[in-house]
């Protein structure tokens, strides 16, 4: 039986059994749409309409009914207990309890009490209340996740001191990582609108047994909205609109769901427009000019200016605005109670996005670039997923997912006082097929055996062009000549094939303990060919590299009593070098990265221990997870010798040569403490603090991407139609000696420069910071919610660790949600 004591249910005695009921929210009293009601055999199902109405005629009086909704607590009762016609069933919102279901750990539904790994869940309601402008902003609200920003139109999440191609992004079971996901900072996490997400789940640490290569730091899994079927034809509509003051944000999103008996569809379109970004004015760190933009380039595609322009408001960051449009289309077809099909189409397209760090970079005390921007970033996904619930001996349930992705990105730059504009264009086609299956051994629900496979083929095309602009006055009227530009990736084409199989076993040894183990075999095959030798001649211009690895995991959960849970995990991870690791050519701050065809895979060996202490009948808890990760053969960017030289003439300058190489061993150690629960019937709170440290055993240098201590504290008041929230975000200081200077990934040059007239000038590192934020949400009607938020109330100036752009100053946000 499910949890009853948190469901309010009123019964009024009658001699006949009710056929029609209404399901409503316990707190607000408003009806709940899309509540599924099933019998025990799951061969009968009805769904509540937009008014919360459900007709129970198809059920007999002695059938046990289960009420389920993704956002509410599951509830069971016999139909005969409902004796009042038009009775009301009151459900409680799921975020208020702790026994949640987690989907990503086993690629199927799993109670969090059986999961040993550190995990986090961020619900759709939490997403709405946080009012994130982008998905990267949303991720920054999740305990244990830090986000770096090179420019405003992006965000690189960091898990346990690892980011970019060391963490795995997944959407609806399809991996977003592709062969050109890079090391350092990766801004691709924003290519889906937060308003389209049903929930987001995070697994911390190596999870390569289930997810394979790339998941060294962890997995971020986006789950988009799903349509539901109904016995009657129902059309539901929704909209969201938001205005933000700090960067003139305007966001609008609309969705429509059509429910039929044999199929359902959901369509959503979101568009956001952002302008120049105002930084905070309150400089408690003491650096009066740090981060200010005193001049900027006003060059465009058709406007030429050989000189920088004075910024009339140095605290307003120019050239950072962009537009983004996202489309989601899903079709749900339940063939019967044992199989269903889901068609999924996602499209994301941005405008040009200026790279802020490049447009503020200087050479001889002058702006170096007139133009440096990413062209429109486009992501297209088609997937078909077949879900099975067969209850066979070796196949209890499972899914087969076939997907195609098309990713396009480009980089365009031109130096100040130059007519030469260089462009690089990348296109990646990804074809994938994966199957994930599970069964209960000997019909025992406490013994779960899982198995699966995954194939992903990446086809990478890289092109470039150089144009000499024809200019009259300030007008760019055309192109007078062309020249050769080095492609970013192999110009003869490249591909990356990954194939894997895995086994997973989870067993409740007793009522107090659960053991899970797993093994995965992964094989990768990379091919690349370089043709043009204008700038670089490689020792081997046509390569074919294969790598194979076996990864393991063992997790143990022990619950000595109802108020304690102890977790332990031993796991290994593996990341095979992709096209970006091996074949990229690019320049950054005087260093040219060149291909290293001898690069080998890197491995992670992880141990973590966690404890959860529940209080007041699991009404709230305190949790702590600590970990130690050993990196072996880890990949770093370091000085490199190519054709007997450590320098190269590139783009008219003599620059240093660097490449990705394998070092020996390094470690990352850290921990996260969390608190969550209900203080009273109307007050809820949650808090977290995360500490990370990383250092190389061989070079004794700090590792890159290690954030300073960070965390949050939230206090929420909720009663009837009103909800108020107050939250505090904080980051500690990152000192100069804690930076990895040699790799250049942490952008030490973006921190305050200390002028020392006696000794040499030096960088301060990242100052500590904190922000206080507030929101209020009011349910005006059963269809309309109003939300007002104030972020960074005290208008603090700060930069996130390793970020080039200053964070937003005080922002007033006004949001309206509607559903009909």
Image (cartoon, rainbow, N blue to C red):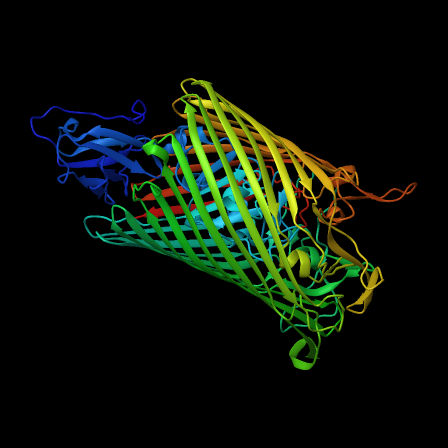
Residue positioned most to the bottom: 480
Relative to 786, 689 lies left or right = right
Q: Is residue 106 left or right of residue 583?
A: left
Q: Is residue 560 above or below residue 332?
A: above
Residue 715's spot in the image, x, y percent?
Answer: 49, 29
Q: Nearer the viewer, residue 800 or 540?
A: 540
Q: How many marks?
A: 0
Residue 24, position in %: x, y?
Answer: 26, 35
Q: Tell me: 676 left or right of 810.
A: left
Residue 217 sits in quarter: top right
Tell which of 405 and 134 is nearer to you. Answer: 405
Q: Quadrant of residue 800?
A: top right
Q: Residue at x 70, y 72 (%)?
A: 485
Q: Residue furthest right?
A: 758
Q: Is residue 121 visible?
A: yes
Q: Quadrant of residue 788?
A: top left
Depth check: 5 or 22 in front?
5
Compared with 389, 441 (above or below) is above
Quadrant in which the N terminus appears: top left
Query: Horizontal and vertical percent for residue 96?
Result: 40, 29
Where residue 118 appears, as percent x and y from the top left, is: 53, 33
């Amino acid at each position: 039986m499910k949890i009853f004591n948190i469901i309010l249910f009123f019964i009024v005695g009658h001699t006949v059994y009710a056929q029609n009921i209404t399901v409503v929210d316990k707190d607000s009293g408003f009806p709940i749409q899309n509540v599924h009601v099933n019998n025990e055999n799951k061969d009968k199902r009805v769904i509540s309409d937009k008014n919360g109405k459900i007709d129970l005629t198809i059920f007999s009086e002695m059938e046990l009914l289960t009420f389920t909704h993704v956002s509410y607590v599951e509830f069971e009762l016999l139909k005969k207990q409902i004796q009042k016609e038009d009775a009301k069933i009151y459900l409680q919102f799921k975020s208020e309890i702790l026994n949640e279901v987690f989907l990503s750990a086993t690629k199927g539904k799993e109670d969090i009490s059986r999961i040993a790994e550190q995990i986090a869940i961020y619900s759709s309601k939490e997403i709405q209340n946080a009012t994130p402008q982008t998905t990267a902003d949303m991720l920054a609200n999740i305990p244990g996740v830090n986000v770096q920003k090179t420019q405003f139109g992006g965000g690189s999440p960091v898990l346990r001191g690892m980011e970019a191609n060391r963490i795995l992004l997944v959407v609806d079971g399809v991996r977003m990582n592709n062969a050109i996901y890079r090391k350092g900072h990766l801004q691709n996490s924003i290519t889906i609108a937060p308003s389209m997400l049903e929930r987001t789940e995070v697994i911390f640490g190596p999870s390569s047994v289930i997810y394979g290569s790339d998941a060294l730091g962890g997995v971020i899994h986006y789950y988009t909205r799903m349509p539901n079927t109904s016995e009657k034809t129902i059309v539901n509509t929704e909209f969201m609109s938001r205005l933000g003051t700090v960067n003139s944000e305007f966001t609008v999103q609309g969705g429509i769901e059509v429910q039929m008996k044999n199929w359902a569809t959901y369509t959503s379109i979101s568009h956001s427009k952002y302008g120049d970004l105002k930084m905070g004015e309150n400089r408690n760190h003491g650096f009066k000019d740090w981060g200010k933009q005193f001049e900027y380039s006003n060059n465009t595609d058709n406007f030429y200016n050989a000189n920088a322009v004075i910024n009339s408001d140095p605290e307003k960051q120019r050239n950072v605005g962009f537009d983004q449009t996202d489309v989601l289309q899903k079709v749900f077809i339940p063939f019967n109670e044992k199989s269903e099909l889901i068609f999924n189409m996602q499209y994301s397209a941005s405008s040009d996005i200026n790279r802020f760090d490049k447009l503020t970079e200087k050479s001889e005390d002058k702006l170096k670039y007139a133009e440096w921007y990413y062209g429109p970033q486009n992501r297209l996904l088609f997937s078909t997923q077949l879900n099975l619930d067969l209850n066979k001996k070796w196949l209890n349930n499972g899914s087969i997912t076939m997907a195609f992705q098309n990713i396009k990105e480009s980089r365009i730059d031109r130096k100040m006082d130059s007519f030469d504009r260089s462009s690089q264009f990348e296109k990646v086609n990804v074809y994938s097929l994966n199957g994930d299956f599970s069964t209960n051994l000997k019909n025992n629900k406490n013994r779960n055996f899982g198995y699966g496979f995954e194939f992903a083929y990446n086809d990478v095309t890289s092109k470039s062009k150089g144009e000499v602009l024809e200019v009259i006055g300030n007008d760019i009227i055309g192109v007078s000549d062309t020249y050769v530009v080095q492609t970013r990736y192999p110009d003869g084409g490249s591909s990356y094939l990954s194939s894997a199989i895995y086994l997973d076993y989870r067993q409740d040894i007793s009522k107090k303990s659960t053991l899970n183990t797993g093994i995965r075999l992964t094989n990768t095959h990379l091919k690349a060919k370089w043709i043009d030798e204008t700038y670089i001649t490689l020792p081997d211009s046509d390569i074919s590299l294969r790598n194979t690895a076996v990864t393991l995991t063992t997790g143990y959960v022990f619950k000595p009593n109802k108020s304690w849970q102890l977790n332990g995990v031993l796991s290994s991870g593996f990341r095979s070098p992709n096209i970006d690791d091996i074949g990229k050519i690019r320049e950054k701050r005087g260093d040219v990265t060149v291909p290293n065809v001898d690069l080998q895979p890197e491995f992670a060996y992880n141990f973590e221990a966690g404890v959860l202490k529940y209080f007041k009948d699991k009404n709230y808890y305190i949790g702590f997870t600590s970990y130690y990760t050993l990196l072996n053969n880890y990949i770093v960017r370091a000085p490199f010798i190519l054709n007997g030289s450590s320098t190269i003439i590139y783009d008219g300058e003599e620059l240093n040569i660097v490449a990705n190489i394998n070092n020996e061993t390094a470690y990352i150690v850290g921990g996260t403490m969390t608190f969550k629960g209900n203080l009273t019937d109307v007050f809820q709170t949650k808090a977290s603090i995360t500490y990370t440290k990383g250092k190389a055993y061989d070079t004794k240098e700090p590792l890159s991407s290690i954030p300073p201590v960070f965390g949050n504290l939230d206090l929420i008041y909720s009663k009837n139609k009103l909800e108020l929230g107050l939250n505090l975000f904080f980051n500690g200081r990152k000192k100069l000696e804690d930076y990895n200077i040699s790799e250049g990934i942490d952008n030490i040059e973006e921190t305050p420069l200390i002028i020392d007239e006696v000794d040499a000038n030096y960088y301060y590192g990242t100052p500590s910071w904190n922000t206080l934020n507030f929101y209020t949400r009011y349910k005006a009607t059963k269809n309309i919610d109003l939300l007002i938020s104030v972020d960074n109330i005290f208008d603090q100036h700060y930069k996130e660790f390793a970020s080039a752009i200053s964070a937003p100053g005080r922002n007033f946000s006004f949001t309206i949600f509607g559903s009909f």
